[in-house]
Image (cartoon, rainbow, N blue to C red):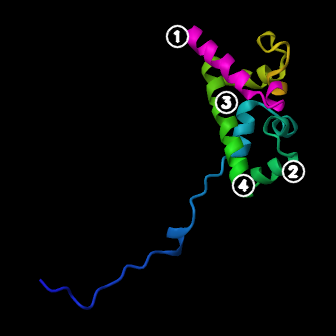
Amino acid sequence: MARNARQTTRVLPETAFQPVSRSICVASLRQSLGLTRKLFSRLTGYSERAIAEWESGKEQSDSSQQRLTEIRRLQQALAQVMAEDEIGKWLLGPNDALGGFKPLEVIERGEIDRIWRLLHQRIDEAA
């Protein structure tokens, strides 16, 4: 069977090739953690100015999206073992299981794995 010499081409809209925004709603995440911009800045390692810009709609870099995704996952895991409105208080309170350090301080020191171990331990105990 012969092909039609006059083929129609499908034109895709310009938006078909634009990347899908993966931006995280920073204001919502920060509020779900019960933290001020200053404390959220400490948690993420980004400036208060960057956080304010993201909250007002500025695009996030890939590295900032990755960090914010980590923080969102942490928030979701914490919400499994405590009331959501208690998370901020927990992050700011000294914790015997962390050698008396506040979870926020542990995260600032780059030791978030200690928080994850603690969470997994509590989840296992609850099961």
Disc 4 residue type?
Ser
Label 2 to label 3, Cα distance in Å?
23 Å
Q: Is residue 16 magenta?
A: no
Q: Which residue is mark 3?
A: 74
For marks 2 and 3 on the same chain, the one whose residue lies earlier in the sequence: 2
Comparing 121 with 25, the one in front is: 121
Magenta highlight: main SS = helix
The image shows residue 126 at horizontal and vertical percentages of 57, 10
Q: Which residue is mark 2?
A: 49
Q: Is residue 120 magenta?
A: yes
Q: Which residue is mark 1?
A: 127
Look at discs 2 and 4 and give the one toward the viewer.
Answer: 4
Please tell me which residue is depicted at 48% across the width and 75% down the height of the picture. Answer: 13
Comparing 55 with 125, the one in front is: 125
Tell me where the magenta segment starts and ends, as one range.
106-127
Disc 2 residue type?
Arg
Comparing 64 with 30, the one in front is: 64
The image shows residue 34 at horizontal and vertical percentages of 77, 30
